[in-house]
Image (tube, helix red, strand yellow):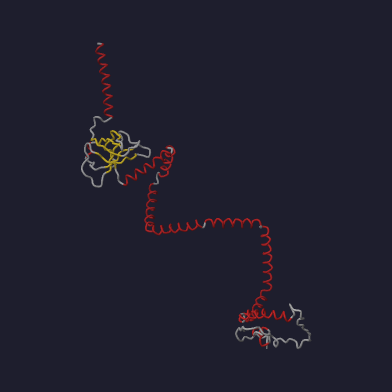
């Protein structure tokens, strides 16, 4: 009886060990048939682990069995489901993509443009080397240091806030994207003009950069002027007050004598027109007077031991009185401006300029 119980205990223990072994084997998919293929890649990173997913167009078709290093790269053993192998061409390629920003990687099988054959047992899959794959790999490599520097809790909070802000606004966001696309379509034909404007703006900016020291110097001088004005504020206030008083006095004078000033200007117009007509003779007369000055100095005895010329002036009673209308000066126009050349002679009545006689009212 005791032996029987011992045998039953050993059988129960063996059964437990067998069940545990079967569980582990089932978990490791030992009893699941798989088509084994190799993926050759230059690196796998830390996020790709054994039992990672293998997907084709987003559909799970297998898992990663093992990862081995081969010196210049790595070999990834893939176990594909037999019912999915017929859908995979022999010239398929693969990418190692992350599930999320911080998630593990999985193997994404990429269909070629011209599928050929069917993938079989022991086949070798090469890493996708297209430009899109290379750019994506570079982006992920550049993004990794940033993600390592960002605190996950802060990033999660920011993403959660963004998700809450966009929640329920999908239609509005879609309309905004559609409008942005329309604006970009209209802007695209004008890109050459915009590029030319930006180039010209860069040239103008270069000119301003070259003129920067002069502009700074001008601003510094303006600062000095402003400081001087601020220091002389009291004097400027006094000047403004004086100008205000003078303006008020001038306004009062013009109001009181405005008509007189206008009448005077009107009456002076014929005289001014006469001056304008004979203005070419002014230089000639002044030049003659200047040339006559040494002779007058000599006649008056300047610079010599001889006595100069003397004159006796006798004041006589005036003749007839002034009669308006008869004795008014007459403005007669005649002849053109004339300036004789040659040596200066004594001034006689016949050598008096015509405009002088007209101004004196010769009759």
Name the image quarter holding residue 242: bottom right
The front one of 197 and 258 is 197
**Residue at horizontal 68 percent and vertical 66 percent from the top:** 246
**Residue at horizontal 39 percent and vertical 40 percent from the top:** 144
Q: Could you say where residue 215 lies in the image, as x and y percent from the top left? A: 54, 57
1 to the left or right of 155: left
Q: Is residue 345 above or below residue 162?
A: below
Q: Could you say where residue 132 lies in the image, as x and y percent from the top left? A: 32, 46
Q: Could you say where residue 209 lies in the image, as x and y percent from the top left? A: 50, 56
Q: Is residue 170 above or below residue 325?
A: above
The front one of 105 and 298 is 298
Name the image quarter holding residue 50: top left
152 to the left or right of 233: left
Task: Please state the total of marks drawn on the protein image.
Answer: 0
Q: Quadrant of the C terminus?
A: bottom right
**Residue at horizontal 56 percent and vertical 56 percent from the top:** 217
5 to the left or right of 361: left
Name the image quarter holding residue 104: top left
Q: Could you say where residue 284 lies in the image, as x and y percent from the top left? A: 63, 80
Q: Quadrant of the N terminus?
A: top left
Q: Is residue 87 above or below residue 321?
A: above
170 to the left or right of 233: left
Residue found at the very far left of the displayed protein: 117
The front one of 33 and 361 is 361
**Residue at horizontal 23 percent and vertical 47 percent from the top:** 114
Residue found at the very far front of the displayed protein: 305
């Amino acid at each position: 009886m005791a032996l029987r119980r011992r045998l039953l205990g050993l059988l129960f223990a063996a059964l437990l060990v067998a069940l545990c072994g079967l569980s582990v084997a089932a978990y490791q998919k030992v009893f699941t048939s798989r088509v084994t293929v190799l993926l050759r890649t230059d690196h796998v990173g830390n996020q790709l682990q054994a039992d990672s997913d293998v997907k084709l167009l987003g559909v799970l078709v297998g898992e990663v069995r093992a990862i081995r290093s081969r010196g210049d790269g790595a070999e990834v053993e893939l176990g594909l489901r037999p019912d999915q192998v017929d859908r995979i061409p022999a010239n398929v390629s693969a990418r190692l993509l992350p599930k999320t920003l911080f998630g593990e990687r999985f193997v994404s099988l990429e269909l070629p443009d011209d599928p050929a054959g069917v993938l079989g047992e022991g086949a070798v899959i090469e890493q996708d080397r297209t430009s899109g794959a290379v750019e994506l790999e570079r982006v992920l490599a550049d993004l990794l240091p940033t993600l390592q520097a960002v605190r996950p809790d802060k990033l999660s909070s920011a993403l959660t806030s963004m998700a809450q802000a966009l929640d329920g606004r999908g239609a509005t966001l879609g309309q905004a994207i559609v409008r942005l696309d329309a604006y970009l379509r209209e802007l695209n034909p004008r890109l050459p003009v915009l590029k030319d404007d930006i180039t010209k703006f860069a040239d103008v900016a270069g000119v301003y950069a070259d003129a920067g020291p002069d502009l700074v110097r001008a601003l510094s001088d303006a600062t000095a002027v402003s400081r001087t004005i601020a220091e002389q504020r009291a004097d400027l206030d006094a000047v403004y007050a004086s100008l205000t008083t003078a303006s008020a006095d001038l306004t009062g004078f013009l109001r009181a004598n405005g008509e007189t000033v206008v009448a005077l200007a009107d009456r002076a117009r014929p005289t001014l027109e006469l001056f304008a007509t004979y203005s070419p003779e002014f230089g000639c007369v002044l030049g003659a007077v200047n040339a006559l000055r040494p002779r007058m100095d000599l006649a008056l005895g300047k610079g010599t031991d001889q006595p100069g010329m003397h004159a006796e002036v006798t004041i006589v009673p005036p003749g007839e009185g002034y009669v308006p209308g008869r004795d008014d000066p007459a403005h007669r126009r005649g002849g053109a401006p004339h300036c004789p050349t040659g040596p200066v002679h004594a001034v006689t009545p016949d050598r008096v300029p015509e405009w002088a006689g007209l101004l004196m009212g010769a009759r």
